[in-house]
Image (cartoon, rainbow, N blue to C red):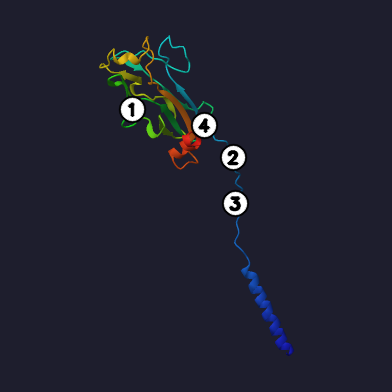
Amino acid sequence: MNKKSLILAISLVLVMTCTIGVTVAYLQDTTDPVTNVFVAADFADLTLEETKPAEYDSNEATNDYLVVPGMGIAKDPKVSFAPEADEDNLVGAYVFVKMDAAGWTTTDNKAFTKGIGNCADALSFSVETYWTFLKMEGDSYIYYKAVAADETINAQKIIANDKVTVSTAITEADLDGVSENLSVITDSSLIFSAYAIQQLGFDSTEAAWTAVYGQSQD
């Protein structure tokens, strides 16, 4: 290779090197940092209250009622689900009501009757339409209400019209199962419990109930 050719070859190498150097220049930009702060979620307060029926009923855990044909029996369990004034970062919840109603009958899980003696509908009541029926577990009926994070439940009644109705057709013979002071009817108890659980993390209302409170977890 003569001197002229060597110079040309070197020039070609330099040109190729310069071309490659141009292709590795990237377009670039940078964002400001984003800081992730994790704050604990909060939950509203759940309460279940009921008016005491009479002065003679001093048991705080149970309520006894006088049964008089044709008269209504006051029955006013109420559920509240509301945050304290300083609570924030609230999350949505399922609020459940479990009603133990052994001895009562129903065809639609809403209207209930209780027979005494020969009177098939001696006692009757209905569950408020506010509550949606979920399922049965043994003698217990499970109802619920889905509550958004910004919602509250304020003294929501469970029993429609706050009473159990006593039929006018009931007779003295039918009342053989009643104690002498007419305060207790055999096998007619109604037991109410209230529960609440977060909505997030569950595919369905039933999944939320079963995971925490359902019989399958007993």
Quarter of the image that includes the N terminus: bottom right
Front disc: 4 or 2: 4
Task: Select label 4 or label 3 by which is in front.
Answer: 4
Q: Earlier in the sequence, mark 1 or mark 2?
A: 2
User: Residue 79's spot in the image, x, y percent?
Assistant: 43, 25
Residue 31 has which mark?
3
| 1 or 2: mark nearer the eye | 1
The image quadrant of residue 178 is top left
Viewer-side residue, 126 vs 161? 126
**Which residue position holds label 1?**
105
Task: Give the Cα separation between the discs numbered 1 and 3.
Answer: 66 Å
| Amino acid beneath label 4 | Phe
Q: Which residue is mark 2?
A: 38
Q: Earlier in the sequence, mark 4 or mark 2?
A: 2
Q: Mark 4 vs mark 3: which is more N-terminal? A: 3
Is residue 12 visible in the rendered structure shown here?
Answer: yes
Q: Does 50 sit left or right of 33 as displayed?
A: left
Q: Disc 3 residue type? A: Thr
Which numbered circle lies on residue 117?
none
Q: Please tell me whether residue 161 is drawn above or below residue 150 in the rendered image.
A: above
Measure the C-alpha gap from mark 4 to mark 2. 16 Å
User: Which amino acid, by three-letter code, is at mark 1?
Assistant: Thr
The total of numbered circles placed on residues is 4
Residue ID for mark 4: 43
Q: Is residue 140 left or right of residue 15?
A: left
Q: Secondary structure at mark 1?
A: strand
Please indicate whether residue 82 sits to the left or right of residue 18 in the image. Answer: left
